[in-house]
Image (cartoon, grey):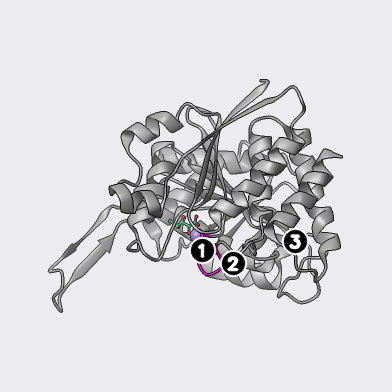
Amino acid sequence: SHSINLAVIPGDGIGQEVVAQGLKILAAVLPQDVKLETEEYDFGAKRYHATGETLTDADLDSLKKHDAILLGAIGDPSVPSGVLERGFLLKLRFAFDHHVNLRPSKLLPGVATPLAGQPEIDFVVVREGTEGPYTGNGGTIRKGTEHEVATEVSVNTAFGVERVVRDAFARAQSRPRKKLTLVHKNNVLTFAGHLWTNIFNKVAAEFPEVTTDYLHVDAATIFLVTDPARFDVIVTDNLFGDIITDLAAAVSGGIGVAASGNINPSGEFPSMFEPVHGSAPDIAGQGKADPTATVLSVALLLRHLGYEAEAARVEEAVAADLTERGDSVRTTDEIGDALAARVAS
Ligand code: IPM
Ligand code: MN
């Protein structure tokens, strides 16, 4: 296709600043004959305060028309916890069936890690995105009493597990090391854990070239710190994936460089690309935010839309920029300009 029709959701806090840089790089890397059309949406704390709305059915209808969505960050301390998370972000992931939540971790040269000896880190977590305890399937009884009981049921369907496991196997198959690790807790979560394990083993038979491994999630957190090189592709459920991808980001350069894609592989709905970090209200508006995670999310967006060469150029530009960056302190804009110059040349 020779046009990209992009929905842009800058959102709150530093979301505005980093998305501006992401768009700058996108415009710079695309070939002249590719028409980039963008439509900006005002979701987030401001709109919520003004209208009480987070994401309406009409909004979803409008977003649906785009090829992809670029999101900065949504969230503000002035909004009660959970309102925008459930009412916007999770609502969107569920409505657009973003069942593959893709979170690559690659330690680039020149990037600081708290780990000893600069280990090889190059893996990708395929986090399930539409099930688990995120479904809001729970309740409270005897609320506010000493005998309050709260449940938060983790929903795992054979359909939902199989499609994400299959996606992870295909990704592992396409990578040089061809290794896939299932992360769960099947020694305790024997219902969901066995469903995941059985489906994982069944699908494995169709991918004989892929080496498989299994780790309980607690053990996985140890290896992510002591031996991250053992990981190539990880597949896991929504909540475990949420937790281990923050840890993965922490060991591979921090949240400033962690990118993600909320992917609907069939293309029935637009996929959404966003930095893993939040809106960082403490540094918002100061031009201090690192736009790198957003720029790497733009690379994932380009790859998803079939612009592989352009995606690779963005990633190479980021790698070169990080290598040369050293201890220099640059503004959000300066980093964006440097990356735009690199991808354009
Ligand atoms: C993430 C975030 C979200 C999640 C929150 C904000 C709902 O932590 O994208 O990792 O838990 O998925
Ligand atoms: Mn998270």
Q: Which mark is first along the chain, 2 or 3?
A: 3
Name the residue: 42% across, 37% down. 159
Numbered tag placed on residue 107 in the rendering: 3
Q: Quadrant of residue 175?
A: top right
**Of the residues shown, which amino acid type is indicated by label 3?**
Leu
Q: Are marks 1 and 2 in contact (CB under 8 Å)?
A: yes
The residue lying toward the viewer, choosing from 140 and 316, is: 316
In the image: residue 328, left or right of residue 61: right
Pointer 2 local density, CA inside 10 Å: few below 14, some 14–19, many at least 20: some
Numbered tag placed on residue 319 in the rendering: none
Q: Provide the secondary structure element on which disc 2 rests.
A: helix
Between the C-alphas of marks 3 and 2, the distance is: 13 Å
- Mark 1, ligand 2, within 8 Å: the answer is yes
**Of the residues shown, which amino acid type is indicated by label 2?**
Leu
Q: What is the x, y in percent for residue 36? A: 64, 29
Pointer 1 local density, CA inside 10 Å: few below 14, some 14–19, many at least 20: few
Between the C-alphas of marks 1 and 2, the distance is: 7 Å
Name the residue: 81% across, 74% down. 117
Q: Which residue is mark 2?
A: 247
Q: Which residue is mark 1?
A: 243
Q: What is the x, y in percent for residue 83? A: 33, 56
Magenta extent: 278-284
**Of the residues shown, which amino acid type is indicated by label 1?**
Ile
Between the C-alphas of marks 1 and 3, the distance is: 19 Å
- Identify the image quadrant of the C terminus: top right
Looking at the image, residue 177 lies above or below residue 82: above
Can residue 295 be seen?
Answer: yes
Name the residue: 67% across, 68% down. 251
